[in-house]
Amino acid sequence: MSIEKFIARRASVINGELVLRVKRIPACRPRLREAMLYSLAAGGKRLRPVLLTASYELFGGAWRDVLPAACAIEMVHTYSLIHDDLPEMDDDDMRRGRPTNHMVFGEAMALLAGDALLTNAFSVLYENSGIKGIRAERVLEAAGILARRAGAGGMVSGQAGDLEAEGFLKLGERAWKSAGAQSAKAARLLDYIHQHKTSDLIMASVEMGAALAGAGARDFKALSDFAGAMGLCFQITDDILDVVGDKKKLGKSGSDVRNAKLTYASLYGVGPSKAKAAALIALARKKLADLPCPPARVKILADIAGFVYRREK
Ligand code: GRG
């Protein structure tokens, strides 16, 4: 089976679970539920939940046993997209091939839909304790990983850096392109943004799977390093696609140039960015080499890394 088919099959199970879990939140205002479901059910590659399940099953478990945790990471990811699209952030009007949440439900409800997805992600994750012997301590560990990687020391700070960089480019547009000191500063800020804005949640996906499986420290570190390199490659590819990608396939309009964003494509150009992405994927795959897990299962993670590098949407 191709990796694309593998991801699509898992994604279709995850899609059903996501909708089910949002539909059964008690006492939720109907319009809020509609706004949450609108963005959740709009599709998306489901890369993060698929990664979580693939990481978990490296250690012998059945992937369906971590579906609540898989839903939780996708809910956090979807919240981040809704908030990222708001006029106060990237101000995008298309996402996942349809109008963004605030275009349909208004800014206030979009904000609340994001808030609810983030908060309820933790109650959904909690449902994982007790499933097929997954002990509560492991679920607690996974919750800690998710909160740390998504919070102020992780994804939210990546986004804060991204906002700061908008000002940075507008202030010194000519200078940062030519002067050494400015471009070194830009390069450091860019790596910080990519690490936290994007890579942290991809790392959380793989780390949560490993934590739920009870992986030892050495294997956990190898998987975390794998995900860190793949996450960086993911965002560099995103930067490239924003410039040269097919907007129809991407399902979004591409706002980096309009927002004068600091990206790999704007700082280094498309060619060198592609080379960097290729090097990162090679590095990511190397990190998997010593895992004492069934080769067929390790190969799934290596293939997902290849998919991240090749993707067109
Ligand atoms: C707290 C107000 C407030 C906002 C937070 C944290 C945040 C907003 C936004 C996160 C930043 C973000 C959107 C990063 C980009 C990551 C990225 C490339 C997302 C696209 O992921 P894909 O391609 O999307 O996996 P699909 O649609 O396939 O799931």
Image: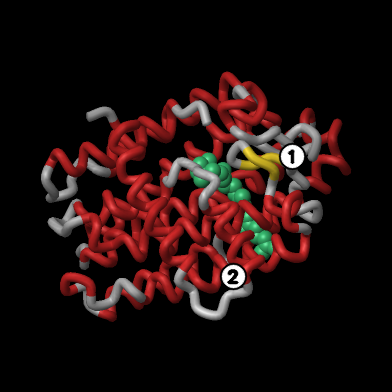
Q: In this view of the protein, which residue sits in the foreground, 124 or 161?
A: 124
Q: Residue furthest front?
A: 30
Residue that badge 2 annotates = 116
Quick one: which residue is furthest to the right in this view?
171
- The quadrant in which residue 37 appears is bottom right
Amino acid type shown at disc 2: Ala
The amino acid pointed to by label 1 is: Lys
Element under label 1?
loop
Left or right: residue 26 compared with residue 283: right
Q: Is residue 200 above or below residue 94?
A: below
Relative side of 72 to 215, left or right: right
Give percent across and percent down for residue 306.
Answer: 36, 31
Residue 65, compared with residue 8, is above or below; it is below
The crowding category of the residue bearing disc 2, from other C-alpha atoms within 10 Å (few below 14, some 14 to 19, many at least 20), is some
What residue is drawn where x is 18% and y is 48%? 291
At mark 2, the secondary structure is helix
Report which residue position mark 1 lands on. Answer: 261
Residue 89: which numbered mark, if any?
none
Badge nearest the viewer, 2 or 1 = 2
Q: Residue placed at 18% from the left, 43% from the top?
A: 297
Residue 60 appears in the figure = yes
